[in-house]
Image (tube, rainbow, N blue to C red):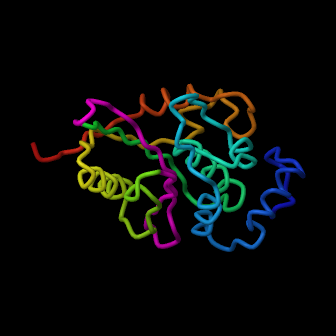
Amino acid sequence: MLDNSSLGYDERDFQRLRELGCALFDSPEQIRTVIDQKEYLDDWKSNYVIQSVRSSLHARKITCIDSAIFSYGLLELLFPDVKRRLLAIHRRDPAKDEEMGHCVTLYWNDAGKVGSFSKSSFTGLGHREAIFDDEHAVAASYAKAYLKMKFTPLYFGVTTLEECAPDIDWRFDPNPLNVISERLQAKYEYAFMTPG
């Protein structure tokens, strides 16, 4: 499976995938081990750069949106028959009057249940087991985590990279892909119903 270069990955990419243990994967859930091997880029605000799948593959540190694009690409490469989507969530920190987003990759298991791959510096915003009935239930689980942190969940949207970024080389471009953030925000379709 790791020798298939039909998507455009090269031998250096496959070597890195083998180093990360991907050659031994027999289920999509194992992708979380790759995400967990990457450090979270805490100081992302000082130089905000969204990375392609290849850039994240070879990077030591990644952000939540890097992780989402990366795990989305890993699903495409390793488990092409698995349904995948991106879930983008927006929230407000009332203490700082600051709004911020979070992005994860959703995947569906053989039983039709939904889980997610996620990278965050916040404990409650990590991966989700594939136990949820649909993408709305996964979004609600992240909203509950926000509420526990005293953040206000605002809205969310679900899309694919093929739909929101058809003109962007999200697999291999070495340059910043920051426009993807704007494209994801344009896909917000649902508002959270929260107390108050």
| Image x and y of residue 50, in percent | 60, 34
* Residue 21 belongs to magenta span: no
Q: Quadrant of the C terminus?
A: top left
Res. 44 image quadrant: top right
| Image x and y of residue 193, in percent | 18, 45
Does residue 74 appear to the left or right of 164 in the view shown? right
* Residue 96 belongs to magenta span: yes
Residue drawn where x is 62% and y is 29% of the image: 177
Residue drawn where x is 43% and y is 43% of the image: 102
Does residue 154 appear to the left or right of 128 in the view shown? left
| Image x and y of residue 179, in percent | 56, 25
Res. 125 image quadrant: bottom left
Count of numbered labels shown in the rendering: 0
Q: Quadrant of the N terminus?
A: bottom right
Q: Nearer the viewer, residue 67 or 132?
A: 67
Residue furthest to the left: 196
Q: Magenta span covers which residues?
A: 94-120
Residue furthest to the right: 11
Residue drawn where x is 25% and y is 55% of the image: 148
| Image x and y of residue 76, in percent | 67, 53
Does residue 135 appear to the left or right of 85 in the view shown? left
Q: Nearer the viewer, residue 66 or 189?
A: 66
Residue drawn where x is 35% and y is 38% of the image: 90
Asked if residue 105 is positioned above or below residue 156 in the image, the reply reads below
Asked if residue 146 is positioned above or below residue 173 in the image, the reply reads below
Asked if residue 122 is positioned above or below residue 66 in the image, the reply reads below
